[in-house]
Amino acid sequence: MKKWVTLATLLIFLMVPFLASGGVPLDTVKTNVNSVLDVMRDPKLKGDAGKKAKEQKVMAAAEKLFDFVELSKRTLGLNWNKFTPEQRKEFVELYKTILKDAYVDKITAYTDEKINFTKEVSLSETTIEVQSTIITKTTEVPVYYRVIKKDSEWKVFDVVIEGVSLINNYRTQFREILGNNPPATLLDTLRKKAGKK
Amino acid sequence: MSRRGPVCRRENKSFSGLTVCIVFLLSLLLAFSTPQGIADAQEKPSDEYGDVTEEVATSGEGPTIADPIEPWNRAMYHFNDKFYFWLLKPVGQGYKYVIPETFRIIFSNFYENIMMPVRFVNNLLQGKPDYAGRELVRFVINSTMGVAGFRDVAKDGFGITGRKADLGQTLGKYGIGSGFYIVWPVLGPSNPRDTVGLVGDHFLRPPTYLSSDWLDTETWAITAHEKVNYLSFHIGDYETLKEAAIDPYIAIRDAYVQYRKKLIEQNGESQESGQTSKGDKKE
């Protein structure tokens, strides 16, 4: 154990200049995306019995990858401010459930595909875009992760697939509802949607 | 949301736990060793559920489109939805079951190859002669060494990739606005500009010239096969989109607008049209 600690300490000092020079966001996203995929590929978690455990593990890995609060804020935009603190918390949870239900199966289908992480592009002072490509049998799909630094960790707050931003897509839909209705109506709609599965 | 402390304590037993700790410690170390990190730590509000600022709320605001004929569009959306589930999907699934993937990839390569004129002309019109040239070279290599376009030798063997280009995109690059949203039966989401583009590109597609008769069955059969072959690789995509949406009609409209805008703004590279065959993946 002591040996490991010594080794680890050494590693830290060796890695600091490398990490500080950039590439941290890309590596973080890559590591966290891969850990989600590793759970997906885990042969021990196959079948109905493993499904529940798998879903929990996927969500735990997803929590490390995403900042769901930031994602929610940026989806709602200024409408977020119309929500009470309780409503905000409920919104984040419901939104998370809906995304999980919709995309977990889809990511499972993509586990055999090769993913290349290519580069980082600075978006603003605090946000960076990590670009990747999913190589399928007949085409290449560009998938960009937009990350923000939170507590010195890089967390994803938007995923852009083929130029389509996830949060913009939901913002347009939520805006339609919030245009004529109070936040409670939107929460009601989301509750129904999340409860279906 | 997990905090650093508990994670370290909980997983300390295993080596992977230790690694996690190292990473966390490292990030901590980094955060406080730079002035920026200190600033970050200080300005971070205690309540992460706090209000959003105008700046954050409006950053990355997506494009929108006028939808004056929404009732028609929604009706067409429902028609297309039924068309997909009742006809296209069963046909695509049957096709996928019967035809081995290897052959479907060959067909996919073949269709991609013969559509070269569309990409060639539009790359030229968009002032990208280099990409137009690459499309031409790809066509020559794939039609000969790739046996009539069955394999993408240009990419797999020579690393030459092309660039997707269509007339709607060309018109967009010329500064012509998209206009309003239209959903066509069978063809799906569009707008006046992209509809003009679609008609124009039709005359650059080789199958159009198979027969002088507009209603020629052979031409239609080829187009149908191309679509079904494409679909066989994409069954489930529409379902996911629909499942994920609160209002699928709005979600698809928004996705279409964002996708087209991106294609018009992009200049190349990440929208290369080269294909990856299965053989390539295995290596």
Image (cartoon, helix red, strand yellow):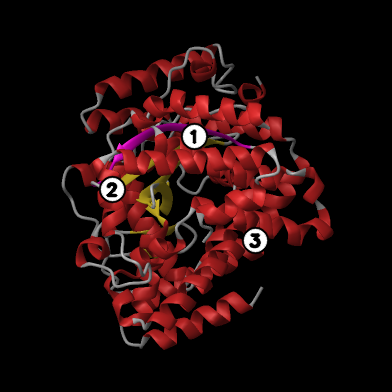
Front position in the image: B130 or A191: A191
Residue designated by label 1: B210
In this rendering, the label closer to the viewer, 2 or 1: 2
Say left or right for B142 vs A1. left
The reply to whether residue B218 is visible in this rendering is no
Does the residue at mark 2 contact the one at mark 3 (Cβ under 8 Å)? no
Q: Residue at x 43, y 50 (%)?
A: A155
Chain identifier of the residue bearing label 3 in the image: B
Q: Position of residue B50 (x, y in %)?
A: 32, 72
Q: Is residue A32 above or below residue A196?
A: above
Disc 2 residue type?
Ile
Question: Does the magenta portion include A116?
Answer: yes
Residue B167 occupies which quadrant of the picture? top left
Chain identifier of the residue bearing label 2 in the image: B
Determine which of the numbered discs, if any, sits on residue B38 in the image. 2
| Cα separation between marks 2 and 3 | 60 Å
Say left or right for B80 vs A69. right
Chain identifier of the residue bearing label 1 in the image: B
The reply to whether residue B86 is visible in this rendering is yes
In magenta, the rendered stretch is: A113-124
Residue designated by label 3: B87
Q: Residue at x 25, y 28 (%)?
A: B124
Going from the N terminus, do you reach mark 1 or mark 3 first? 3
